[in-house]
């Protein structure tokens, strides 16, 4: 067995004050029962507004293996995880939620699978406790659409708990865009992957931060990031409408010539105007989604800023390439390579 394996665990945390003590207790349990692994935990506070920061800083204070990072604004869990990964050294790193719906005790099994040679080990939900059937249907439809239409080879029921090899982390950080959709961004990299099933427990503390609005945004992000299908669909729909319009025009002209009487038509005109207007607005909206993301990427703004930290490894600059240098966090040391400096400026 490989001794002294360095495993980093990134945990995004947002307003989880009620669950913090239980989280630390469970993490300590994992460390205590896996002494052959050197665990380090990177807790990324996604700008919580409750007592989470104080509780976490207190718990991390005397434990150098716990790093605390606080982002300067609420960026969403995917950006928070990327911030943690950017500061994670080690052979591999896992990420999971802070609410203990994903059991940290599963991490050793993910490590075993990594030792067997897998590079991306997804912890997949065999079952989800405590969710309404409507939510379950929506979630399954979402992942089905992503797989079938978006062509993202994510686990069929999705996953927000995984362990990544160092190679995958580097590839991810070098290629992820301004609006990350983490599962898809990892899946599209390739690499040898495997699935380990687990039961996603019901939340014991606090409530889910994934509001309907956030879910819709994540859906749009995922689709626009990975798929051209909406654009292609717009073109086909546009063509279909034009053909229908021409056919209708031909029909009216023929009727006018053949019957030699005016066509009473305000209703059909209204129908055509409304249908075509609606289709055009939808098309413009879809175009806007792509354009807006292109603009965001072109701006090369950092994805996050670090407001506060504890035990942050200052010798661990974020992984970067010239291309995405502008999208990394700026809580880390300034780039030393000339190309990086130019890209940031
Ligand atoms: N989270 C975060 N930023 C946010 C929303 C959530 O860091 O803006 C964290 C949250 O604290 C939790 C994880 O992301 O650790 C998953 O969030 P949640 O449990 O609300 O998602 P769900 O389990 O309902 O999908
Ligand atoms: Mg949760």
Image (cartoon, grey):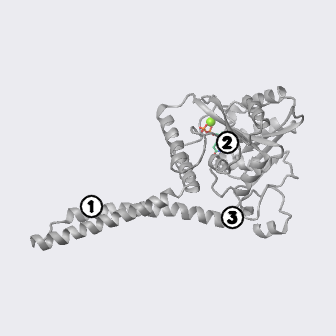
Whole-percent x and y of residue 10?
A: 75, 42
SS at badge 1: helix
Lower sequence index among marks 3 and 1: 1
Q: Which residue was labeled with disc 2?
A: 14
Whole-percent x and y of residue 97?
A: 68, 37
Q: Nearer the viewer, residue 284 or 240?
A: 240
Q: Which residue was labeled with disc 3?
A: 300
Residue 224 falls in which quadrant of the image? Answer: bottom right
**Gap between marks 2 and 1 measured at Cα:** 48 Å
Count of numbered circles in the view: 3
Give the label, 2 or 3, closer to the camera.
3
Query: Which numbered disc covers residue 314?
Result: none
Look at the picture and state if 4 lies above or below 338: above
Judged left or right of residue 12, residue 87 is: right
Q: Which residue was labeled with disc 1?
A: 271
Whole-percent x and y of residue 227?
A: 55, 55
Q: Would the CB of label 2 be found within 8 Å of ligand 1?
A: yes
Look at the picture and state if 106 lies above or below 70: above
**Proximity of marks 2 and 3: CB atoms separated by less than 8 Å:** no
SS at badge 2: loop
């Amino acid at each position: 067995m490989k001794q002294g394996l360095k495993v980093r665990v990134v945990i995004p945390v947002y307003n989880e004050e009620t669950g913090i003590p239980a989280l630390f207790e469970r993490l300590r349990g994992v460390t205590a029962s896996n002494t052959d692994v050197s665990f380090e935990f990177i807790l990324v506070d996604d700008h919580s507004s409750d007592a989470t920061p104080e509780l976490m800083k207190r718990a991390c204070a005397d434990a150098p293996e716990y790093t605390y990072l606080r982002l300067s604004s609420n960026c969403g869990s995917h950006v928070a995880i990327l911030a943690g990964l950017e500061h994670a050294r080690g052979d591999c790193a896992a990420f999971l939620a802070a609410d203990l719906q994903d059991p940290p005790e599963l991490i050793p099994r993910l490590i075993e699978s990594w030792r067997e040679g897998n590079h991306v080990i997804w912890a997949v939900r065999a079952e989800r406790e405590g969710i309404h059937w409507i939510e379950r249907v929506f979630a399954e439809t979402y992942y089905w659409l992503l797989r079938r239409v978006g062509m993202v080879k994510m686990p069929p029921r999705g996953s927000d708990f995984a362990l990544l090899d160092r190679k995958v982390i580097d590839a991810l950080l070098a290629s992820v865009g301004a609006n990350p959709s983490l599962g898809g961004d990892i899946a599209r990299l390739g690499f040898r992957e495997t699935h380990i099933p687990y039961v996603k427990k019901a939340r014991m503390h606090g409530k889910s931060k994934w509001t309907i609005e956030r879910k819709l945004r994540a859906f749009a992000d995922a689709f626009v990031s990975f798929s051209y299908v909406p654009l292609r669909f717009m073109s086909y729909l546009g063509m279909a409408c034009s053909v229908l319009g021409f056919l209708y025009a031909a029909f009216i002209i023929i009727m006018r010539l053949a019957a030699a009487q005016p066509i009473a038509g305000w209703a059909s005109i209204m129908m055509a105007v409304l249908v075509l207007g609606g289709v055009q607005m939808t098309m413009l909206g879809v175009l806007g989604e792509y354009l807006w993301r292109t603009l965001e990427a072109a701006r090369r703004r950092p994805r996050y800023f670090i407001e506060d930290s504890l035990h942050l490894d200052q010798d661990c600059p974020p992984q970067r390439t010239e291309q995405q240098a502008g999208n990394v966090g700026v809580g880390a040391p300034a780039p030393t390579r000339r190309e990086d400096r130019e890209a940031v400026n």
